[in-house]
Structure formats: structure tokens, C-alpha cells
Image (cartoon, rainbow, N blue to C red):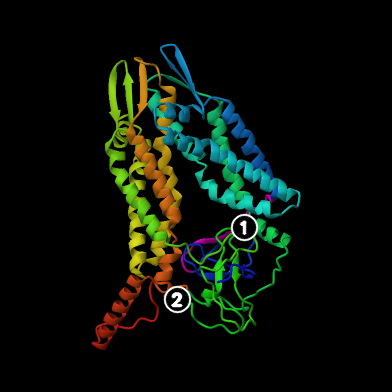
Amino acid sequence: MSGALRTLWMVEGCCECPSCGLMQRLPTMRVARVAECQRCGAHLRRTRPAVGLDGTLVFAICSALLFVLCCLTPIMELNVYGREREVSLFTGPIEMAREGFVLTGTLVAIATLAMPALSIALMLFVQLRIRAQDFGPRVGEAMRLYEKIRPWSMIEVYMLGIFVAYTKLVDLATVNLNVAVYALAALMLTQAATDSALDAHLVWARIGQTRGLASDACRVADVDPPPADDLERTMQAGLTLGDAHYFCGCDGCGALLCDRLPDDPVDRPFDDKAPYRCPRCDVALEHRRSNPQVRAVALLLAAIALYVPANVLPVMQTYKLQSGGGHTILHGAIELWQDGMWPLALLVLFASITVPVLKIGALLWMTIATILGTPRGLVGRTKLYRVVVIIGRWSMIDVFMISILVAVVRYGALANIKALPGVACFAAVVVLTIFAADLFDPRRMWDVAGYNAAELRRPPMARQWHKRAAAIRAELRARGKLRTKRNVSV
């Protein structure tokens, strides 16, 4: 294969579903509408409310000002027998590092300081460049980076950690909340408003126009896409959405690209080893990630190995007037329940115990089903994957809470809270499961089940499983014990 880059064309008005891989046409949409995948229900595009670019820029500027205020003012003050201490966004990571948990403190700093600051700076850059009518390649790079790091900006999760820490501190001392708490709450709202007002699809379309891409460089036939259970059906003219091996969706900007024009007689489907790059965002293209299941399983096995010590070992040690001891995650939830704060206890129990088990179990189930190539429950598995991605980072509540308590309760024999190895194990479990969910490609589940024109991409085990299942069904039909169904349920 030559090292020269191959020429690609963008397909207007179509996209590849990021959850199931179905290539379909996007409808004409009004403001504040959502286009869903006709097969798995994933959101393909959401048109934003008509706040305009100025409104998005205002939200971004407000987020920047609020973040600066959060960094300059303390979150809370603690008074124990006349001795006062303050905690800010910086003190938690610093104290965790001083106690020997450098990686855990670094993780807290990344999620509460570095990523929020970087995401706000990137959004400001994008909005200012848009306002200046500059849609150059740097804007595209900033957009791609923003979309990747935004889930790691965990201000809303940190707010819940502050709330849980506050409920534990009121029994130890007098606690006063400062300006930074309210600034963090406002920052959480302004960041959500920025994401809600930003129309990434429109930004990428402008970038494509600036880079000189013709909107009609390659069109599909002007008919509806094929139904989800008949992707191989031939259309009437031109390149068809059923010929999925000629198309590739860009993971960077969402563009649908093809490797030939309608009148091109050369049969040259996408080759995963060919040097393709997206003409709009310049991201290296491939049909699917290489060996995503193997990498995801490796991370899941590491998470399982750490999950037991994360729940058995104490995560922190509390002393007040020489009395106290170690606390596990479950013990902390039980204490909240005994104090009458059962909604908060249920929240901690769900986020810190149920969510990790759900993530590990769901990802293992989906990985095994992908290896076997089973077509059963594809829609349900795809929806479950989207849930796993959304809830994954909320398990950081306990890590943030402990970083706050360790930073503020340091009064020697009067009152003291120390972090213990359990918190490092738990933080590692959360990070490993987040990475495992990110590496897992849900489109593979549909590929190996025979959809997306991907029969040739089935692994050997899946091909053998399907051949054996087909032989059993044929034998049962011959005996009259199995009725033929017209449509296969997915």
C-alpha cells in the first residue's frame, strides 16, 4: 500500500450512527429538535435553541469569570474549639499528595482544576474565532479537544462531594460555606448552558466550508436509507447507504466520507490499513478501532482486581478527641442512613457501589456477546452502553469528599481525618472503568451480528457460532419445529 493519502469525498446530509454504525440520512430540522437513529434510538443531531453565537459566548465568559472566582476564594471554613481552617480547590489535591497519595491527588486536581480550566479556555477560543468569522484548522482542533476532555471536567460531581462532606463535618465542628461554593454551583449551570447552546454540527459545517469542501462533492441517491434489517438492499442510483464498506464515519467531526464517486468504475472499498484522513478535521480515519475488546477486557480485569480492596480496605480514618477509626465506603453510607439522611445515603450507595458493579458487569457482558457475535438484545445492549458512559464519572463523589475532609480536618488530637489506601484503589477502579467504556466500540456489536455489511469483519469464533446456529435452525425448519420469521428481532 502506498503511503500517499487517498482522496475522500464528504456525503451531504448523512451520517453514521456512533452507537450502531447505521448510515442514514439526516432530516431537515427546526430549532430545538432531536434526530434519532432509526435503529437504536441514539441522538444523531440536536438543533440548539436560538440563543445565537453571542449567547454561547456570554455563557463561556461567565464560566471563565466564575472559575477564577472559585480559585481565588475558599470553599468552606471549619472551626473546632476556636481553631479555624479553610479549604479551597487547591488544598484537597495538595493534602492528598502530602499523605502519600500523589496519583489520587493528581486525579482530583485534573478533574476539578485542569480539565475545567482547559475546557473553558477552549470554548472561549472557539467562540471568539467564530465571532471573528475564522473557521480555520485551529478551531477544528480546539473543538475536537473540547469534546474529548469535557466529560473529565467534573464540577457537578465535585459539588455533590462538597455536599456529602458538609453533612459529615457538621458533627465535628462549626462549618461555614463561602463564596466559592455558590460560584461552583453557578459554574455548573453556565457550563451546562454553554453545552446546550453550542451547535457543534453547525460549527463543523462552517469549518468544512472554510476549508473549501464542496457541499455536493458526493451525494447519495435521493431516496430514503435502507431499513435497518436490510442494509444490503440495492438502491436505484449512485452510491447507496447499504454499501457500507465504501463509507466511513469520522470520529472527530461526525462527517460521513466515501472513497469513490458515483461514476467511479473502480471497486475500492475502505481499507483499515490505508492512510486516510478526514478532509474536514484532519483526523486519521479507520472503519473501527483495532482490538477494542481486548483492550477493554484488560482494563476491566484490572478494575475487578482493584474493586475488592477498594471496598474491603478503609478509605479514610476519622479521629475526634482520640476516639474513632477507619471507614469503608459502605460504612460511610450506613452512617448517613443512621443519621437520618437516607436520600444522601442512597446516593452514595448507588454512585460508589452500584455504579462500579453495573459498569464492570455491563461491559463484560457486552464484550462477551461481541466475541460470540450474538444478535440478541442488540438495541438493549446499545442503550445500556450509553447509560454506562453517562454514569461512569459520578462514582468520583467519594474521592472528592475524602479530598475535602483530609484538607480541612487537621487538628491533631482534637480532630483529624486521614486518607487510607482504599481511596486510591477506588479511584483507580473509577478511572479504569471510564477508560474501558471509552475504548469499547458499540458498533462492533452490530458488525459481528451481521449488520452494517460487516460479515467479513466477524471474528472466527463469531463466524463459527453463526454457522452452527444457522445449521440448527435449518434442521429445525426441516423437521417443522421452527417457523420462519420475516424480520429478525434485534
Residue 204 position (above or below residue 258): above
**x, y percent for residue 320:** 33, 18
At mark 2, the secondary structure is loop
In the image, farthest residue toward the bottom: 478
Q: Quadrant of residue 455?
A: bottom left
The structure residue drawn at horizontal position 47% and vertical position 39%, both measured from the top left corner, is 157
| Magenta stretch prevailing secondary structure | loop
Single out the residue that lies furthest toward the front: 2
Q: Which residue is nearer to you in this view: 125 or 481?
A: 125
Q: Tell me the kind of residue under disc 1.
A: Thr
Using residue 216 as the reference point, say whether residue 429 is left or right of it. left
- Name the disc covering residue 229, or none: 2
The x, y position of residue 293, in whole percent, is 39, 60
Q: Which of pointers 2 and 1 indicates the residue nearer the eye?
A: 2
Give the labeled residue for mark 1.
Answer: 47
Disc 2 from disc 1: Cα separation: 28 Å
Q: Residue at the spot x=39%, y=62% of the render? A: 380
Q: Quadrant of residue 445?
A: bottom left
Q: Residues within 10 Å of mark 2 (few under 14, many from 20)?
A: some
Q: Quadrant of the N terminus?
A: bottom right
In the figure, 14 relative to 74: above or below? below
Image quadrant in which the C terminus is located: bottom left
| Lower position in the chain sequence, tag 2 or tag 1 | 1
34 displayed left or right of 477: right
Task: Tell me if mark 1 has few (under 14), some (14-19) or many (20+) residues whose alpha carbon lies within 10 angstroms of its own.
Answer: some
Q: Is residue 228 above or below residue 49?
A: below
Asked if residue 48 can be seen in this view, the reply is yes
Q: Which residues are magenta?
A: 39-52
